[in-house]
Image (tube, grey):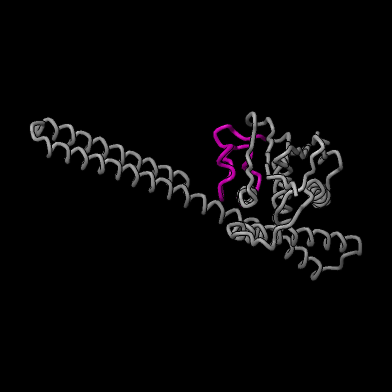
Amino acid sequence: MRITSRRKTIAFFVTLGVCLVGLAVALNVGWIILNWREGVMLFLGVIFFAVLIAGMIVNTSFLVREIRRNEQHDSFINAVTHELKTPIASIRLYLETLQSRAVDEARRQEFYRLMLSDTDRLLGTVEQVLKAGQVAQKVAKHQRAEVEFTGLVQECMDLVRLRHHLQPEALRYETANSNGAGSVVRGNAEELRTAVSNLLDNAIKYSGKKVDVAVRVNTDEKHVVLQVRDSGVGIPQDELKRIFKRFYRVSSRSLAQVKGTGLGLFIVRAIARKHGGKVFAESAGEGQGTTVTMELPRSVA
């Protein structure tokens, strides 16, 4: 209901803006016809109406953008609320069970494992929200160092594989032709680790029931390029650039059950830009998988 209301509001402002622009154009044309002999007044009138039209267009665009931004903020709040409430409710249920009844040791250990998993989920959500705020800050020079990127990527893969309980073939590293160039980049190792982990987590999350993610690091004289390719739900062509915006989530029905905050790829883009690089996504469409590429300047020191 709320989304439908916002769409009606957007349609109203767009229609209002079009009507106002049409009215301004009609007034301008009528004024020109009535005052075509008055050269100076005619010139000033044209300028005045041009400014008026431009102002109305800018105002309408601003209103529509703000409505969409508020909608994204609401979606983010709902997503974060769910990501926090669900594991808390789960932990509470396990604790109440342990408190109210006798549980054998095997069952008790299983409860402990599940509660630890839920706390990891909580911690991950909190860290992602905090990281989204931190990536806007500039990296101090003393925080930058030479980082062997291929090794960092493989470390992240090991951690993600363990966290998601994946088999080695589900998340695999593909050897790439580096032309003899090293994969050393200059930057903040912790932030780069966050970016790589977010890319891997994102690929796994949107892979569907069968996880099949391939990771490759290519190098040339100037760049180190990380590619993360999955065989999952894919992304519509018109949304490939939007997925890196803060709070943005793909609106496909096939992704309705996938939970998240809409911050992961935004954080990746922010970190890549801070390190002088870029990130972009490619997909043949829904159901065709996605390849996300992060390109960083290679350190030649």
Secondary structure predominantly adopted by residues drawn in magenta: loop
Q: Taking the image as drawn, is residue 85 in sight? A: no
Say above or below: 103 vs 51. below
Question: Looking at this view, is 92 or 65 the one in front?
Answer: 65
State the residue at coordinates (68%, 45%): 297
Counting labels gives: 0
The answer to whether residue 258 is magenta is yes
23 sits left or right of 39 in the view: right
What residue lies at 30% left-to-right and 42% top-to-bottom? 54
Picture quadrant where residue 290 is located: top right
Residue 264 percent location from the top left of the image: 64, 50
Q: Is residue 60 left or right of residue 151?
A: left
Query: Percent from the top left, x then y, of residue 72?
Result: 52, 50
Q: Quadrant of residue 178?
A: top right
Q: Residue at x 61, y 57 (%)?
A: 135
Foreground: 69 or 33?
33
**Percent coordinates x, y for residue 192 in the rendering:** 71, 52
Residue situated in front as seen by the camera: 10 or 111:
10
Going 70% across and 41% down the picture, which residue do you hit? 223
Specify start and end residues of the magenta stretch as a single range: 233-262
Name the residue at the front extreme. 301
- Please state which of residues 97 and 61 is positioned toward the viewer in this rendering: 61
Residue 142 place in picture, x, y as percent = 69, 63
Residue that sits furthest to the bottom in the current view:
99
Q: Is residue 186 visible?
A: yes
The image quadrant that residue 176 belongs to is top right
Determine if the magenta segment contains residue 35.
no
Task: Please determine whether, in this image, residue 295 is positioned above or below residue 88.
Answer: above
